[in-house]
Structure formats: C-alpha cells, structure tokens
C-alpha cells in the first residue's frame, strides 16, 4: 500500500491532479480484497516448498521451523507419476474435461438463449429454478439417486431387465456405460449453474441492439446469431479460459462417490484427484499431495496462459488479462 | 422487409413486451427441452424427500426406492428431537450466510469495478494479483497455520466467514458482467459531471449491473450455506457456533467411518454404530438443508433481481 | 467495507487474546479424542479440573473428535505444529498413524517422563503393552505413546444366525465340520426356504479373506487394502504359519486362489449380495442386513463381550460367534488405541502426568469415560453402573479411545466381574512370532501408492467373488508386478529379517 502511494507521489509531477485522485480512490476500492488476498492466499504460499521437501517435525516443533529444516528432495515427491496407472488417470482427466467443457458450453448457452426467448415468463422462471436444484445436492446424495437406478438387486434398470427376461447388467462391475453416466451426471449438476451465468449476461445486453436488428429486418435466429452470441462472447470466453485452467483437476465427488468407489470401474473413473486421494490414504505423505497440487496448478497455469494469449490475438477485449 | 421493421418500430413505441418473437412451434420445442431437463433436475430432490419419509425397514429390504414398502415420519420426529442443537445450527447457518454474503459481495464488487475501468492505472497488477491465486495456493495446512496462529481464526464466527470472503472466480465473473452491461460512456459522462468514484459506482454502475450482483450473491450465499469443511478445521471447542451443514456432515461421516472400520474398534464402537442415524434421517437432514436455500432462490429472482426478469426487454 | 473487515479481524484478535487472558495461573492442557459423541462436557470437566488441579497441576480442555472428523483434525493439528493440542489419540489404524508419525517427529519420546512420573502407570499397564509401544522413532528407540489397555488381541469369528440355522435343520457343529469350502448345501437350502432375494452369506470380504487363508494385517502395510501377508498357524497362533516368518504377496498364494474361486462360486450361485462387492455400498449393505439378522453366516472381528452388546441383542435372532483361531496379539491390535504427546506442546510434563493418571486412576478414568455419578450414571446396590440415558446422550466418549478400560467399574448390563474376565481373556492371548514388527514403508512409498491403487481396483471384487478369478486374478497379479510388487516385498522382507535377527 505504501509502495503504491510512494509511486504515486513520484509520478505526481507527470500526471494531472484529477488522474491521481481517480487512481487513489479506485485503489482504495481494491484494498479490502487485496488485503484479504495477501493474508489468506499469498502469505501461505511459502507452503508450496513442501512439494520439494521431505516435510517432518523438528525441535522446536513449529510449522515454520519444520519447513526450514526439512531436507530438500528435488522432484522425489513427484515420483508417484511413475505408476503404471498414470497414463489412464491422465487420459481420463483430460478426456472428460475436454468433452465436458465443449458439451457444457454448447448446451448451457443453448439453454440460456432458449430461456431468454420464452414468452411465458412464469414457466421460464420455473425452469430456471428447477435447473438450479442439482447444485444444492452433494455428490453423495446424487450417488444414492444413481444407485436407485443401477443397484444390481433393487435398482430400477436391473429390475426392468429381470422383468423383460434379459440378462441383468451389473453396472458397478461393467465399465461400458460409465463414460455416459458420468457425462450425464456432470451436465445435470452444472448446466443450471452455467446457464444462469449466461442468462444473466444475456439480460445485460443493450436492448437497442435488438431493436436495430429488428428494424433491419433480422429474423429471431439472425438476432441470436448477430446480437445475443456476440453480446455474451466475453462471458463465454472467460468461462472457457477458466475451465481450461482446471483441465488437470477433476470433480472428486463425481468420480469417487457416484461410481460408489467401485474398483472394477477404475479404468474409466480413475482421475488425478482420486488417485492422489487413494495414494495419500495409504502413505499420509504431505509432500506427495503438495506435489500433486502443485503439478495441477502448474499445468493449469500453462493452459490458461496459452488460451489467454490465443484469445488476445483474436479478441483482445475478452481476454482474462 | 419494410413491413416487418414498421411493425417492430410500432411495437417498440407502444412499449410492447414482445419484440419479434419466435413462433409457437419453436417456443413449444424450447418448452419441451427445458421442461424435460428441469424435471430431470427436480426428480432427485423428490427422491430425497421420498427416502426421508420411507420406513427404515423398507430401505433395509429394497434399498432406496421411489416406491417404498411403507412410509414413516420417524426421521423427522427424530430430527426435531435434536431440538436446540438443530435450531442453533440453523441460526448459525443463516447468520454466517447472511453476513458472509453481504461482505463478500461488497468486496467482490469493489475489487471488480476498478478492474473493469480501462483507465485505472494498476488494473493489470491487481488483476494478476487476484487471478494468480485462482491457480496457485499454499495448500491446506499452510493456510490453516496462517489463519489460526496469525489471524486468530479459531472457534469463532470469523473463522467460518473470513477464509472464503473473496473468490477470484467471482471477481472475474463480476468484471465480465460489468464489461457486458456498463457502457464506458456512462462513466465518462458521470466523471465529466464531477461525480466522485464511489458515487459513480453506487449511483450509476450498481443499478445497471444488478443482474450480475444478484448472480454473484446467489453463488456466494450457496457456497456459505453448503460449507462444512471450515467448521471441521477451525471449530474445536466452541461447538455452539456449528452450522447446520456440519451437523449433517458429521453424522454422515461418522456412519461411514464406523461401517468401514468396524473390525478395528471393538464392542463399544459397535454400540455406537447401532445408535447412528438411519439413512432416512440423513435424507431428512438433507431436506432441512436444501429447503431454505431452495425457498430463498425464487426470492433472489423476484426481489433482488429486479433486472433479471427473464425474457423482458428493458427499454 | 474496510471497516467491516478490520472489525472482524480485530474481533478475532480480541477473542484469541481473551482465551489467553482467561487462563489463570494453572496451564491448560488440551487433549484430542477419537470417536466421541459429546455435546455437553461442562459437568464432567468441572469435576475433572477440581480433581486434577493438585495431582497434575493443570486445567484440562478437550477436543471431542468424532469418528468422521478426527483423522483430518488430528493430521492438521500435528502437521501444522499446533501448540494448542497437547495430547492426541493415535494408533495403528488412524490417519495420524503411530509408527510413521513418531518417526517423523510429531510425538514426544516419553521414556524420561515415564522414568520420572510413571511409576503408577507402569504398574497399571502390562509390560507387553509398553513393549508394543516401544518403537524406533525420531529420537531413537523408545515409547512414544501411552498404550491404552483394551481388547489387545485380534480374533476373527463367523457370525452365525443360530435361529435360522436351527430352522434349516443344522447345528453350529455341522457348519464348522463342513467348513468354508463346503457350505453350498446349507446356503442352497437357506435360499430355498427364505426366497430368492435372501442372501445367506454376509461377508466383510477383506475379513473373510483373512479368516479363510489365516493371513493377518501387517502393521505399516498399505492401509486401505493390505498387500502383504504373514500366515498364522491356526492351531497355535504363537507358532510359525505355513510360510514361516516370511512376508508374501497375499494375492499370489494358492490359498488366496482357492478362496477367490470358492467365493466366486458362492457369488454366482446368488448366496452373496452383489452390493457387498462395491466399495461404498459394501458397508451400508452389511450393516443393514445385520440389523434384522437377514443372513445365515457373517464375519465379525470379535471383541470380548460383543455378544452381549445392545446391537447384537437387538437383531432379533440368536447369534453365536464362532472363532476361527484363538485370539492372537499382533502389532496392529497391540497398538489399537494410544495417546501421544504432541512434540509442539508447551506443557509436556503436565500432559504426561495427566495421561499417567488417566490410565492408572479409576476415579479419573471413570469420570472421563462414564461421566459424573448422579448425573450421567448411578450405582445400584451391587455397585454396578446404571447409565442415565438422557444425560449420556450428551456425553458418551468412545470407551476404548480414552485409556485403560480395565480400571472402569462394571456396568449393570455387562454384569459383575465383566472387566475382570475381560482382562483375563486378553492377558491369556498369545503373541504371534513377529509381534512388534512394523514395516517402515517410507523407502517404497511411491510403489505403495501405486500398489494401493491397483489393489483397490481388483481386491474387493475378487474377495467378494463378484468377478471370475480365472481371468481377473492373472491380470491383477500382472498389474501388481508392473506397479513394483517385487521391490515392495523385498524391502518388507529385508526389514522383517533384520527385525527378527535382533
């Protein structure tokens, strides 16, 4: 804070009084958030070194002293990646994420556009409210719901198969359907949320643009294409970039609880987060989990920077930074 | 062509609501798609309610089912027997959510607004300051150490509010809302009129960006309402301030743990396992958690989101 | 806005300062328990603090960790060097696992303190338990935790629904004579009588595997799914088993293959509920069927007095627990519930004095465990404890997790002399030949992480019979090999040999 003011003073001669005043007031707006960031986010960041250390307790046993005295082990904590499962978990993490980013984008934008175009406002509101419901339920609860359909003894689908005299599918030992089931679950949970974001963005579009388009004789479809979509482009791009930054992270509950942690399904449900969780449950190695977190962040950072610079070339206004 | 634009103009002049709408056919298709998906979203919740009212015996015999063998209100009776603990945790959840949302939304808007201003000098610096923490963090234990021993966040309400007061994600969303809804000319005009920065934000910008604020408020309040991990970390002795979600998670996790480790714990633990809440009780608690926020959601739509009236064209 | 934030931070600061100011001249020691169900400890703590003020010279505060949150709370407190937690529960199966946390320096070595203040403690706890707690830690070989005196031996039993068995026309002796590999006929009959949706064989698959193959849990092995095995001699648990004192890959033995094949037969025939074969549904399914005794034969890790516990009596059928072997003392069981002093603690002496008292003084132990007489329980004419259910609902710690249970008074429901017989039962248990061995997995941590994941993928389904061992077992073994099973085994065996040589 003092540094900024000092900088301000130094440049005082070069800038108009009004500009400095503006900068000052705008900076005061940033302060609560900036202070929070420094205290809660930046101060703990020294903890990142745990990923490169063999963390343990020393005397006196304080966190700071332990970090300083623990020996450096280079990349040893990252060696969990040598596992033969690594290929599968990376394939699953990236594959599902890419698929879901695309599907989620297309469908939630479509839903938002549809809702904004409905004339029956009461129904539109009702849909929107209902679509948000899955967001309230945890994956544990959602997993009971999936179980009610798939349970080999009492589930609805096996029950119908039995009634029809077909062979009963034991879903929790059969990988065939899980890519589809997980995809449905993911969309089910997140569509309401993201379409609300897009819908709010659509309602913020300046209406005179629609009027102008209508005056020019654009059909409704053309208005969507030429006004609505460009209008929410910044939101689309921002959400895309941020999703890309999470490409190496997976929604733990979806991959752990929904398949009921069934071992037979690991070939299609093992992702980075579940692997690290299971590994940590056995080793209790703080360094390894820190290393995994660091790796996810690092890859996320590279992806975001890549995506952002791409966006900056095409549409500088929409870029993240 | 001219006919269309003529009629459109007429409609606009008349302040008519519909500005060149889709035909009934297309509208019906939209309704069909949205209604189908909405049903998909609401059915699991109905399912949870059914389980909450299912008898224990039915769950034991046929598992979770839409059509239980017999019904029972036992889970709810039991829940009400939790008495004070339940209502106190309800109160705590409301308090934490209300205070947390108010503070968080304020901080978010204050942080996002200068980022949206192209003429702000330190825009890039603060943008990066926030964005970077979305990707990198110190991890659970270091954050805990700072919060507890440096900031004194332990066994108090602040511990359940402060650690999630600010989210870079929400800042970016808010900034994007500002970009898409607030024209730069508006701010320039205000500045020329001699309006101060705070008064421009409060009087000019906030009214325009209401839908965005409501959306952020919704996301933040949901996050606070559903939060239980902070309680696990920071509440050790002062259980008086335990929120509802943590009360539920403790029951859930206790049951899971006991079932998984029964072979390690001896006869005494088996006794504890037998006393644990049933599946229907867990679902009853889920109902207790979801109902208030589900009720609050239309409220967000109706009152806070004056601007977010779906399909309406502001003019 | 700034005001609000600073207000909150100041408030937080004031609160934390207050908590310091509130303490009078006596230091406060804080203990973190596991598995408790306590919502009101005020009456108990008042009495406790009165009682220990002179004896310990400190005030007690308690963090009542529950089953579901203890692991995270404890690991967090220890790894963050939190000086506000003085004493913490630890054992061979919790996340703050005794051996590895002692090795990493989180626990204080207690030998000097025992020498100075531990005479009563040493008298109250059998030498063998002290021995079991003596390990190679950060400060060399020594005792790093006070070992609770509880059911210190392992014994796996078949949990038999005698009511149903009699109805089918068999006796427990018939059952045991036929043995695990010969129950087809009985299961078929049960299915015939009780209907197609009845599953007679209610197993905890991993436990069933240990019961049939006579393998045991090796301390320090992957916790979620054990990989290593030592084999017991079922006739005499203190003698060497079929493979001697050598660790083997438990999934690679002919014993395992025979077990998995038999389970698969039972599963295919519909004798085992499919829900038992899936990670997260397995436990719920078992608990549900146990509750109304809707099974014929189950598995149970047994503790003395289990058949008299309320939930077994409530099943509505006569239940008998038939042991596979005599109770045996292995490292895992003998480190089953312990209390360690956090090396970040600022009051280690007071903390130890408290622990010593808790484990040797019946008054304090009873107070902590059963609550205050007249509030949480009353004594009947025979001096047996009768609980006041209403008050107990707000105060019931996990008895085994508090300390020395043998100095507790008998309760009316257990009957007079229960604690004495309990003590005798476990005093008579024999140790396995490699008792005290703990595998230090740190040299092969990455292998263990990978192997644990592979085992989690295959083991439960195979143990439960849900998949065909003909095809799955070979791919399981191949996956284990690829994940470094050989290096893991070699390391473990080298350590075991070195241990036995000492």
Image (cartoon, rainbow, N blue to C red):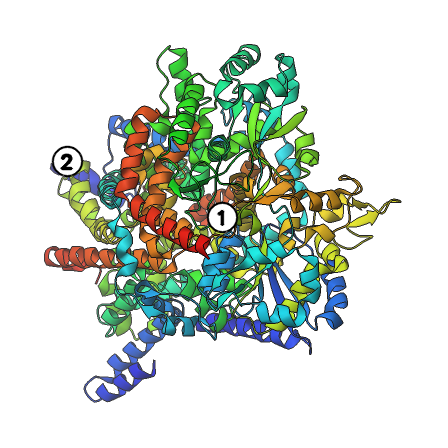
> Mark 2 Cα within 10 Å, few/some/many (few <14, many 20+)?
few
Neighbourhood count class around disc 1 (C-alpha, 10 Å): few under 14, some 14–19, many 20 upward: many
Quarter the N terminus of chain A occupies:
bottom left
User: What is the number of the mark on residue C434?
Assistant: 1
Q: Residue furthest right?
A: C381
Q: Compared to A243, does C157 lie above or below?
A: above
**In the displayed structure image, the side of residue C78 where residue C356 appears, left or right:** right
Q: Secondary structure at mark 1?
A: loop
Q: Out of B136 and A18, give the one closest to the viewer.
A: B136
Return the residue nearer the eye: A245 or B194. A245
For label 2, the residue is B3
> Which quarter of the rendered picture does the C terminus of chain A lie within?
bottom left
Q: Quadrant of residue C288?
A: top right
Q: Could you say which is closer to the camera, residue C29 or residue A165?
A: C29
Query: At which x and y percent is residue A45?
Result: 34, 68
Q: Is residue A237 left or right of residue B16?
A: left
Q: Is residue A85 visible?
A: yes
Say which chain tag 2 marks.
B
Is residue B103 visible from the viewing direction of this image?
Answer: no
Residue B177: x %, y % from top left: 29, 56
Which chain contains the residue that carries disc 1?
A: C
Q: Is residue B49 left or right of residue C123?
A: left
> Looking at the picture, how far across and down is residue A257, in whole percent?
41, 39
Of residue A90 and residue A27, the one placed in the foreground of this image is A90
Q: Which mark is residue B252?
A: none
Give the secondary structure at mark 2. Answer: helix
Q: Nearer the viewer, mark 2 or mark 1?
A: 1
- Tell how many labels: 2
């Amino acid at each position: 804070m003092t540094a900024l003011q000092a900088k301000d003073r130094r440049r005082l001669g070069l800038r108009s009084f009004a500009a400095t005043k503006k900068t000052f007031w705008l900076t005061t707006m940033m302060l609560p958030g900036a202070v929070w960031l420094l205290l809660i986010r930046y101060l703990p960041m020294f903890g990142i070194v745990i990923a490169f250390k063999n963390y343990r307790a020393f005397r006196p046993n304080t966190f700071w002293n332990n970090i300083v005295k623990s020996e450096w082990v280079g990349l040893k904590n990252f060696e969990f990646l040598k596992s033969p499962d690594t290929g599968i978990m990376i394939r699953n993490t990236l594959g599902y994420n890419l698929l879901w980013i695309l599907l989620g984008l297309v469908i939630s934008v479509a839903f938002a556009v549809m809702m904004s175009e409905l004339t029956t406002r009461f129904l539109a509101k009702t849909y929107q409210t209902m679509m948000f419901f899955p967001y309230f339920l945890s994956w544990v609860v959602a997993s009971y719901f999936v179980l009610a359909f798939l349970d080999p003894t009492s589930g609805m689908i096996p029950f119908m198969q039995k009634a029809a005299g077909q062979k009963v599918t034991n879903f929790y030992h059969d990988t065939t359907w899980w890519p589809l089931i997980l995809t449905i679950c993911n969309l089910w949970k997140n569509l309401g949320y993201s379409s609300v974001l897009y819908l709010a963005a659509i309602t913020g579009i300046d209406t005179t643009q629609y009027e102008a388009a209508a005056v020019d004789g654009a059909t409704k479809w053309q208005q969507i294409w030429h006004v609505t979509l460009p209008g929410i482009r910044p939101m689309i791009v921002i959400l895309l970039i941020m999703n890309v930054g999470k490409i190496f992270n997976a929604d733990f509950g979806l991959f752990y609880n929904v398949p009921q942690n069934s071992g037979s399904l690991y070939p299609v449900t093992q992702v980075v987060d579940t692997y690290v969780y299971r590994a940590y449950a056995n080793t209790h190695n703080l360094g390894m989990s820190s290393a995994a977190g660091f790796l996810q962040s690092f890859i996320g950072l590279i992806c975001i920077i890549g995506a952002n610079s791409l966006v900056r070339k095409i549409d500088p206004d929409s870029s993240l930074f | 062509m001219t006919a269309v634009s003529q009629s459109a103009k007429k409609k606009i002049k008349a302040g008519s609501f519909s500005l060149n709408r889709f035909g009934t056919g297309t509208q019906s298709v939209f309704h069909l798609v949205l209604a189908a998906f909405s049903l998909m979203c609401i059915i699991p919740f109905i399912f949870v309610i059914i389980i909450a009212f299912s008898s224990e015996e039915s769950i034991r015999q046929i598992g979770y089912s839409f059509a239980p063998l017999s019904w029972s209100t036992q889970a709810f009776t039991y829940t009400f027997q939790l008495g004070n603990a339940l209502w106190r945790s309800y109160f705590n959840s409301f308090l934490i959510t209300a205070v947390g949302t108010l503070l968080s939304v304020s901080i978010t808007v204050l942080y996002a607004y200068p980022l949206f201003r192209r003429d702000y000098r330190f825009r890039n610096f603060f943008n990066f300051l926030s964005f970077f923490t979305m990707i990198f963090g110190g991890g659970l234990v270091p954050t805990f150490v700072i919060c507890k021993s440096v900031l004194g966040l332990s066994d108090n309400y602040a511990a359940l509010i402060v650690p999630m007061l600010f989210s870079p994600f929400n800042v970016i969303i808010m900034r994007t809302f500002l970009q898409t809804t607030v024209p730069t000319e508006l701010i320039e005009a205000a500045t020329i009129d001699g309006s101060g920065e705070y008064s421009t934000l409060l009087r000019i910008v906030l009214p325009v960006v209401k839908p965005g604020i409501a959306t952020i408020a919704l996301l933040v309040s949901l996050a606070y309402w559903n939060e239980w991990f902070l309680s696990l970390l920071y509440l050790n002795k002062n259980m008086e301030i335990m929120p509802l979600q943590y009360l539920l998670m403790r029951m859930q996790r206790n049951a899971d743990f006991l079932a998984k480790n029964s072979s390690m714990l001896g006869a005494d633990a088996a006794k504890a396992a037998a006393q644990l809440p049933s599946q229907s009780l867990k679902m009853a608690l889920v109902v207790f958690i979801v109902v208030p926020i589900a009720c609050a959601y239309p409220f967000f739509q109706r009152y806070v989101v004056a601007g977010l009236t779906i399909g309406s064209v502001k003019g | 806005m700034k005001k609000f934030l600073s207000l909150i931070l100041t408030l937080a600061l004031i609160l934390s300062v207050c908590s310091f100011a509130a303490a009078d001249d006596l230091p406060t020691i804080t203990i973190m328990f596991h598995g408790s169900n306590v919502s009101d400890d005020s009456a108990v703590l008042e009495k406790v603090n009165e009682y220990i003020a002179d004896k310990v010279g400190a005030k007690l505060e308690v963090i009542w960790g529950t089953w579901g949150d203890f692991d995270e709370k404890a690991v967090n407190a220890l790894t963050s060097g939190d000086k506000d937690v003085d004493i913490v529960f630890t054992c061979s199966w919790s996340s703050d696992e005794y051996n590895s946390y002692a090795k990493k320096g989180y626990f204080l070595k207690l030998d000097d303190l025992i020498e100075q203040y531990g005479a009563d403690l040493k008298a109250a706890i059998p030498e063998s338990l002290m021995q079991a707690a003596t390990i190679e830690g950060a400060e060399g070989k020594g005792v790093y935790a006070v070992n609770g005196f509880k059911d210190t031996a392992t014994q796996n039993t078949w949990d038999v629904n005698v009511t149903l068995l009699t109805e089918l026309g068999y006796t427990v002796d018939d059952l045991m004579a036929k043995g695990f590999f010969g129950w087809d006929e009985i299961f078929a009959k049960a299915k015939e009588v009780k209907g197609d949706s009845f599953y007679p064989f209610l197993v905890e698959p991993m436990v069933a595997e240990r019961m049939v193959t006579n393998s045991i849990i090796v301390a320090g092995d992957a916790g979620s799914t054990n990989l290593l095995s030592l084999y017991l001699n079922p006739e005499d648990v203190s003698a060497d088993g079929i493979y001697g004192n050598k660790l083997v890959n438990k999934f690679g033995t002919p014993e395992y293959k025979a077990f998995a094949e038999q389970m698969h037969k039972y599963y295919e025939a519909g004798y085992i509920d499919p829900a038992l074969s899936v990670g997260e549904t397995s436990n719920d399914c078992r608990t549900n069927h146990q509750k109304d005794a809707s099974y014929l034969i189950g598995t149970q890790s047994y503790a003395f007095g289990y058949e008299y516990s309320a939930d077994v009596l409530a099943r509505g059928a006569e239940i008998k627990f038939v042991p596979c072997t005599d109770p045996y003392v292995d490292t895992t069981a003998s480190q089953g519930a312990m209390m360690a002093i956090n090396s970040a603690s600022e009051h280690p002496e007071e903390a130890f004095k408290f622990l010593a008292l808790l484990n040797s003084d019946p008054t304090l132990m009873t107070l902590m465990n059963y609550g205050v007489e007249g509030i949480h329980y009353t004594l009947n004419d025979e001096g047996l404890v009768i609980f006041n259910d209403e008050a107990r609902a707000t105060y019931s710690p996990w008895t085994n997790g508090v300390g020395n249970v043998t100095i507790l008074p008998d309760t009316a429901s257990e009957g007079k002399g229960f604690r004495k017989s309990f003590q005798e039962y476990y005093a008579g248990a024999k140790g396995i030949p490699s008792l005290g061995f703990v595998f230090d997995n740190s040299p092969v941590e990455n292998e263990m992480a990978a192997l644990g994941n592979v085992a989690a993928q295959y083991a439960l389904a195979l143990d439960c019979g849900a998949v065909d061992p003909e095809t799955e077992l070979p791919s399981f073994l191949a996956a284990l090999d690829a994940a470094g099973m050989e290096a893991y085994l070699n390391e473990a065996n080298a350590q075991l040999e070195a241990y036995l040589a000492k």
